[in-house]
Amino acid sequence: MPIEPNWGIKKNSDGKNTFWFGFKGHLVVTTKSQYIASRLMTSGNLSDSKTANPLLKEVENLFPGHFTTTILDARYDFEPIYRQLHEYQMRAVIHYKSE
């Protein structure tokens, strides 16, 4: 994972581009306790979806079989993420990307 500060861009709720320079923090948070189960810091321009599988792998290594369901937004609607979740026998709640 790239860890140098870099420019990131995404569209806000008004459809306008938002820019930032620096890093992004990616967290796996439990819904019951709100504890952080895993975290990853990356360059600001890295897509969120690219961090999903490494985070899922770390969670499964730290807490094998403990988590049964994952809730993710549309940025994580990619086949490799579904395959990883299936391998760990986790159910997926992922908002589909609108085309």
Image (tube, rainbow, N blue to C red):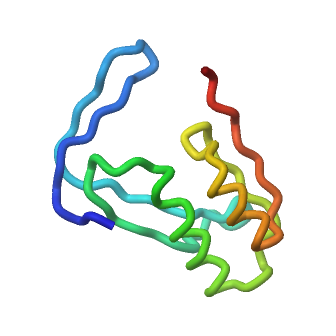
Q: How many marks?
A: 0
In the rendered image, which quarter is residue 8 located in?
top left
- In this view, the residue in front, 56 or 81, is 81
**Residue visible at 44% across and 59% down?**
26
Q: Using the image, determine if residue 94 lies above or below residue 15.
A: below
User: Against 70, is 18 above or below?
Assistant: above
Q: Is residue 82 left or right of residue 14?
A: right
Which residue is found at the position 71% from the left and 55% from the top?
82
Residue 41 vertical placement versus 61 (above, below): above
- Name the residue: 56% across, 79% down: 58
Q: Nearer the viewer, residue 52 or 14?
A: 52
Res 73 quadrant in image = top right
In the displayed structure, does residue 35 sit left or right of residue 20?
right
- Identify whether 50 is placed above or below 14: below
Where is residue 9? Give x, y as percent: 29, 34
x, y percentage for residue 59? 62, 77
Q: Quadrant of residue 81?
A: bottom right
Q: What residue appears at the point 76 percent right and 47 percent down from the top-left corner?
A: 93
Question: x and y percent of residue 32 in the render?
Answer: 74, 63
Front position in the image: 88 or 65: 88
Q: Where residue 1 sits: x, y (%)?
A: 33, 67
Image quarter of the C terminus:
top right
